[in-house]
Every structure is written in structure tokens, then in C-alpha cells.
Amino acid sequence: MADHELDDIDREILYALQEEARNLSSSEIADRTEASSSTVRKRIQRLESEGVIKGYSADVDYQTSGYPLRMLLFCTAPIPERGDLIDEILAIPGVISVQELVTGEKNLLVTAVGEADDDITPVAQELLEMGLTVADEVLVRSHERTPFDDFSSRPKADDE
């Protein structure tokens, strides 16, 4: 069961913020949810304080900004240490995300970006120096995202 019980208004707010947090006002979100602007603002504050909304960030196109290489490094860390290593891994120049995996031998997924191979190699070297095994490296051609559709009350493709 989820830590936070979300109702339809909460889910629609989350969908709207994922879709375009920068350009949507609470009034525009209120129009989507059929709630008042003040209700939307209070809900957003509650979702932030409960940790459902962890923050707001720019969706950077690394290729367009001069970093055309995106590498996924599947690593193996000692199970008791894998969660403790995340902040240290995030501090490595070029690393943009770390995911803790709970199945299989590969239990950390590190994403790094760079201009050239020479930018990615030091990331792998630092991971090795931390005692991790780099089990696999995958070069990503493209990376696109979309808001989680279960947060939207709009009809899904199958419902139309």
C-alpha cells in the first residue's frame, strides 16, 4: 500500500506538474481538477511536505547542450553498502543519476553524460576505486520521458 493516499485531485495535480510545472499556474491546474486555486496551492504544499513531490527540476537535453554521450553503467555493490554509496556516486563529475536495484547481481544503475568517451572512462574508474564492479556499460541513443498516466483522469489511449 502507498505511504500517501492520493485522491483524484492529488493525482491530477501530480500529472499536471510532471507535464509542465514551470508554465502552469495553480489557477490552470484548478481548471483541470475542478478545484479552487487555493485548494490546489494547499494540496501542492501538502504533497511537498509529505515528500510526494521531492522537488522541481529542468528536463535538460544533454545532447543539445553539448553532452551527446549518455552511458548506463550497471554496477555490483555489496548489498549492505549499496544504498550508502549513492551520495558518493552522485558526487562523481558526469554522473546525473543513480538507481538502486533490488534484483539480480547488478544492483546499482549509474547514468553518466559526457562530450566524449574520455569523459565517461573516469566515471567508471572512480566506481571501480569505490569497490564497485562495473558489470555492463550501455550507450543510450535517446531518452524521452512522459508523465505517469495513472495520475491523470484523462482517458487513456485504450479508453478512447
Image (cartoon, rainbow, N blue to C red):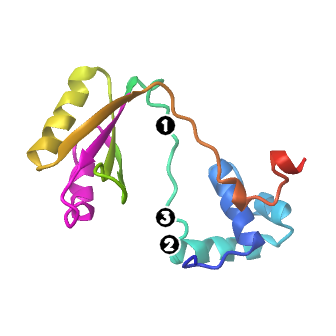
Q: Quadrant of residue 40?
A: bottom right
At which x and y percent is residue 101? 36, 56
Q: Which residue is located at x 40 percent, y 23 percent?
A: 68
Q: Which mark is residue 54?
A: 3
Q: Which mark sits nearer the N-terminus, 2 or 1? A: 2
Q: Nearer the viewer, residue 71 or 113?
A: 71
Q: Which mark sits nearer the N-terminus, 3 or 1? A: 3
Is 90 contained in the magenta span? yes
Is 64 contained in the magenta span? no
Residue 57 versus residue 12 in the image, above or below: above
Residue type, mark 3 in image:
Lys
Q: Secondary structure at mark 3?
A: loop
Q: Quadrant of residue 133?
A: top left
Q: State the residue position of label 1.
A: 60
Q: Are marks 2 and 3 in contact (CB under 8 Å)?
A: yes
In space, the residues marked 2 and 1 are separated at their CA atoms by: 23 Å
The residues colored magenta run 70-95
Q: Which mark is residue 51?
A: 2
At which x and y percent is residue 15? 69, 57
Residue type, mark 1 in image:
Val
Q: Which residue is located at x 47 percent, y 24 percent?
A: 141
Q: Which mark is residue 119?
A: none
Residue type, mark 2 in image:
Gly
Q: Are marks 3 and 1 in contact (CB under 8 Å)?
A: no
